[in-house]
Each structure stands twice: as C-alpha cells, then as structure tokens.
Amino acid sequence: MDRIIIRNETESDHREVETLIREAFWNLNVPGCDEHYLAHMIRSHYDLIPELDLVAELDGRIIGSVMYTRSHLTDESGNEMETLTFGPLAVLPGYQRMGVGKALLERSFEIARNMGYEVIVIFGSPANYIARGFKSCKKFNICPEGNIFPTAMLVKELKEGALDGRKMTFHESIAFNYDCAEAEKFDSLFPPKQKEYRASQEEFYIYSHSSVN
C-alpha cells in the first residue's frame, strides 16, 4: 500500500477508469451496472470538481477511482449551503478491502477541506462509510424533499459544527440524472459480460428502499 499514488485523473485515464468502475460494480447492486456510464457523463458536467476527480495508481496500473460533484442544502427559509457528493467510488476487484478506497477518500477529504468545503452528503451502504466519519442524515436533520430520512443517505462534516440541526433539504447534481437506454448503448462498447443476480443486490434494494424513523 505504500506504493500507491493518489493523483488527479487525466483524459488518457478515462477508458481505464471506466473499465475499472464497470468491473467493480458489475452485478453488485443490480444485474449489470450503469456506474461506468455515470462516470463518463459526470466528466463533462459543470458540477464535476476536477480537483476531486482522483485515481489510485499502483505500479502504473489504476486500481481505484473517485469523483466528486457539487450539491447543496437549503433550509426552510431558502438559505443555501454548497456541499459535496462523491460517486462513483470504485476499487478494482482483487484490491478491495485493502485500504485503497480509504486512501482515496482521506486524500479527497483533505483536498476538499483546503478548498473550503464543510459538508459531504452521499447515498451508500452505512457499513462502508461509518468508519470514515459519516453518520445518518437524520442526526443532522437533513433529508430529500419531504420528511423521510433514507437509510442510505449519509452525511459527514468536514468542519465540526458546520451543521446546526436546522431542517435542511438535500439537492444532488442533475449529473446523476441519466438515460438508462443511453447507458445500455455505452455498455455495448465494452467486452460482453453476463448480467446475473447476486445476494448483494438484495442488500442494495433494502438500503435504497428503507428509511430511519
């Protein structure tokens, strides 16, 4: 792990990173995956933060990737706070559970703090992010439209006390809105892979369809 280099993604990395993301997410949350197409679309979106578009490289091979986009919170008076959202975060199979994702996130947190960002809001499995300082959105009184606190919605304060408990609504970047048919077309540019059911897909379904009371 001491040989891992964390650096910004370059244009020449794009295909390798998309292939990595595809390998990492294939059949994980649903049969197949769209995350490599999402990464492809985010790169050209104005909400991408280039300084936080990072890869982890080991011996000349990219084994991990993370991208950040701008998002924001609004309170009930209409006041707005700019926040960050990352995703996809991917580590090449064979290098997972070895600290690659941790290294990417900790480096990105450092850069984000230096850029003046104070809050990160994501959707993900709590088991994967609690150790990185994320907490349930309900503890910060943050939720999407309505009064439902999704189980998978997690919040991290990069600056302690940045959130004061006011009810705030989360708005992610429209970069995450994509055409599934176009994602299928994009995937056809890669070597064929079999779409199959995995038990992890049930876990994803539970997290993505549940909330904290």
Image (tube, grey):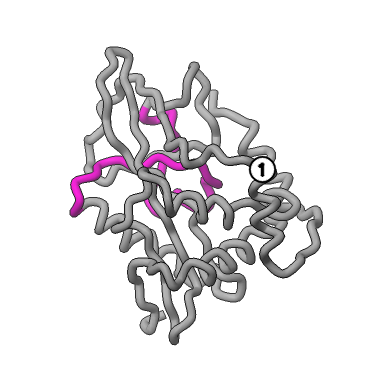
Q: Please determine whether, in this image, residue 149 is positioned above or below residue 39.
A: above
Percent across and percent down for residue 61 are: 48, 81
Residue pushed farthest bottom? 59
| Quarter location, residue 208 | top right
**Point 45% across, 26% down: residue:** 143
Q: Secondary structure at mark 1?
A: helix
Task: Please say whether residue 115 is one of the residues in the magenta stretch.
Answer: yes
| Quarter location, residue 163 | top left
Percent across and percent down for residue 158 are: 27, 46
| Quarter location, residue 106 | bottom left
The quarter in which the N terminus is drawn is bottom left
- Apparent side of residue 134 relative to residue 34 in the rendered image (left or right): left
User: Which residue is under mark 1?
Assistant: 180
Residue pushed farthest top? 77
Crowding at mark 1 (Cα within 10 Å: few <14, some 14-19, many 20+): few
The quarter in which the C terminus is drawn is top right
Percent across and percent down for residue 141 are: 38, 25
